[in-house]
Image (spheres, rainbow, N blue to C red):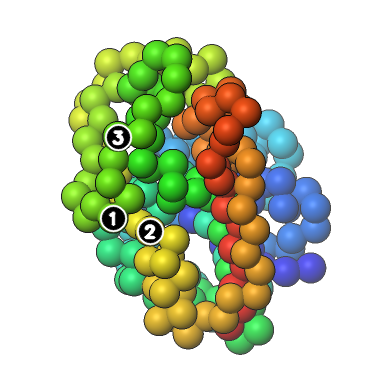
Amino acid sequence: MCGLGVVPAGYGEQTLKILGAHTCVGFDISANALKEATELAKVARVECTFVKSDAQRLPDEYANIFDIVLITAGALCFIPDIDRYFSQARKILKCGGQLFIFESHPVLKMFDMDRDRDGVAVLRNDYFTEEPQCHKTGLDYYTHQTHDALPIYYFHHKLSDIVNAAIKANLTLRVMEELSFDPSLAFGFDAFGDTRPPMGLVLIFST
């Protein structure tokens, strides 16, 4: 049994609660995301706590209490200061705790997302860019239907940025696995046909 912190709040904490996690807390800056997470927890009949918080400034009351921190798909692209983000993840972990990352692979940021193209994937962006990308369309991740939306900005972090930020936060890399699918569902299974780049990423760090 363990304490679990999830950033952002959503599906992960409820699944792991069912699997045996003792205390589950989800953090998210979005009130709407927290509302949806609360509703999902009720449907799943699991007890989770949801906290409205900037992931770059997690409340001090949660310092050193979690055995596991889970960073779920679609989180890192919204974080401008990744060094501070990982320092906060480290802050809420116990000694001997582990940080799990289940994310889209940074290589995908080089391609137009499903919402921005029709058909064949287009290689368009520089992997080494430091400029945030602006999107003005929304995407239903299951039907892949697009819709007009307010502008949203994604921050691109190279794989080395992610690993180095964790190392800087005094975390030790234990496992690295590249996946053939995108955990965020921003890219469909058939986005690249039979010649897929790495689409997903699993990283496990320990304190």
Residue 97 placement (x, y as % from top left): 63, 77
Residue receiving disc 2: 158
> Which residue is pictured at 73% across the width and 63% down the height?
22
Residue receiving disc 3: 124
Residue 168 placement (x, y as % from top left): 40, 81
Residues tagged 1 and 2 counted as in contact (Cβ below 8 A): yes
Residue receiving disc 1: 128
Residues tagged 2 and 3 counted as in contact (Cβ below 8 A): no
| Disc 2/disc 3 C-alpha distance (Å) | 16 Å
Q: Is residue 7 visible to the viewer in this orientation of the structure?
A: yes
Image quarter where the C terminus lies is bottom right
Q: Earlier in the sequence, mark 2 or mark 3?
A: 3
> Which residue is pictured at 78% across the width and 49% down the height?
18
> Horizontal placement of 80 versus 39: left or right?
left
Outermost residue toward the front in this view: 195
Q: Is residue 10 visible to the viewer in this orientation of the structure?
A: no
